[in-house]
Image (cartoon, helix red, strand yellow):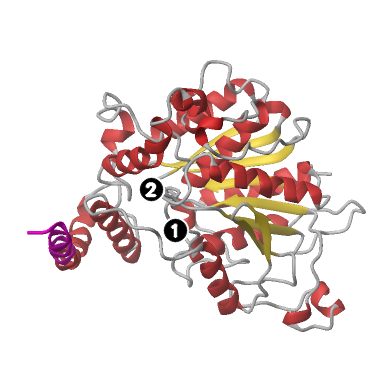
Amino acid sequence: MSDRIKHLFAQCVYAIAFPFIIVYALITAPFIPKIRHKKRRRIILEASIRWIQWCQIRLPMKREKQVSRDNYKVWCAKYGVEEDIESLGAGAELLWIGRKGAVRGGRGAERGPERAAAGGSIGSAAVRTPRRVILYFHGGAFIFCLQPFAINFLNYIRHEASKGLKESDGSEADSESIAVAMLAYSLFPDATFPTQLHQAVLALRSLLDQGIDPSNIIVMGDSAGGNLVVQLLGHLLHPIPSIPSLKIDPIPAINTNIKLGGAYLLSPWATMVPAESHRTKGTWKSNDGYDILSTKAVVFGGTKILQTLREAPGVFQALEPYITLHGAPEGWWAGLEKRVGRVLVSAGELEVMCGDIVEMGKRFGEVHKDVEVLVVKGGIHNDPTFDFFFEDELKPGQEVDGKELKQIVDWARGVFAVGR
């Protein structure tokens, strides 16, 4: 039997098994203390993602067909928001929300002052330089693109965090005072490390070139995007030199005197490939089966991503501190307090990487006095973003049931409140 036929057969078996997996999850959930509090559709969502990733590591890896730009365009069309795409070069783009017109309520766009000044039409909205920006790096194991529910999450954060903010003249900040710039970076296997870091640096430099004060920039990332935030902070502290054996352009330099307002790492991919002895300990073992990610899936994805890097003699050792928690030597994060004002690190209580993520937060806290580590009770990998998967659950202006999401909003507001 050829490999192609084997794979087709496996896909059929996985598809047939899928509804049984969902039924099993629904039947057993009430008897599992850690998840019995969750809504039925959340149980279905988590079981679905868990099953899909279980299948993916048993099938050949394929290139992602979707691209971040397309999902962004669909989101903009759905909510009546004008597209605002900035080319950065090197294959990267910034996908903006809040630089053109207003985006309110998640149900559609309302006329903002910029649109009125430009004649009121979507097509003629003027581009303004925002005062406050969330620079966001999406997750997806560096393999998958930006997802629409992540945009809903960001739109909620920016609107809610703007409430209570004051402008320099003492007036109340409006709901459009915070913009979001989402980096559409190149994906694996077409692009490997440090391509994404190169693109992240271009994104940050673009914001600085537009005159946005560093103290009014929050760099945020989830999962692989959280790892990219760590890479960027590492590059700020220890600029990566040119490495000819990688056959890439040198990583652009950033003004090493800048101090960002904040950095938020949401379920960051702290350890890309946990050591074998580590996989049977801590949350790698205790949460395996509760999280949407399995320990095997993390090992599989990390091994694929790092494969090319590990084949380059000496290069992996030189670059490992930038991309994995346990690869950073003692003293690596010294000076972090001079490069970022506040740091928030969050993990789901039930995610396999929880232990390593909390450890990362502790290491930051050893060299920085303003580091918060938030563990979402009963949460999974990337838990806060999944509150926005179902569109009727949360929109800007709605009250929040989970205190953790409110903490994230309050943290972001606090960062921008002390910006210049």
Residue 182 visible, this orientation: yes
Local crowd size for mark 1, using a 10 Å CA cut-off: few (<14), some (14–19), many (≥20): some
Q: What stretch is highlighted in magenta?
A: 1-13
Foreground: 50 or 297?
A: 297
Q: Is residue 103 above or below residue 219?
A: below
User: Of the residues shown, which amino acid type is indicated by label 1?
Assistant: Phe
Residue 250: give x, y in percent of width and height. Answer: 63, 36
Type of amino acid at the residue the image marks with label 2: Ile
The x and y percentages for residue 153 are 55, 60
Q: Which residue is drawn at 65% across and 75% down?
A: 81
Does residue 343 appear left or right of residue 299 in this picture?
right
Which image quarter: residue 164? Answer: bottom right
Q: Name the residue under label 2.
A: 380
3D distance between C-alphas at marks 1 and 2 = 9 Å
Judge left or right: residue 125 versus residue 277.
right
- The kind of secondary structure the magenta stretch mainly shows is helix
The residue that disc 1 covers is 386
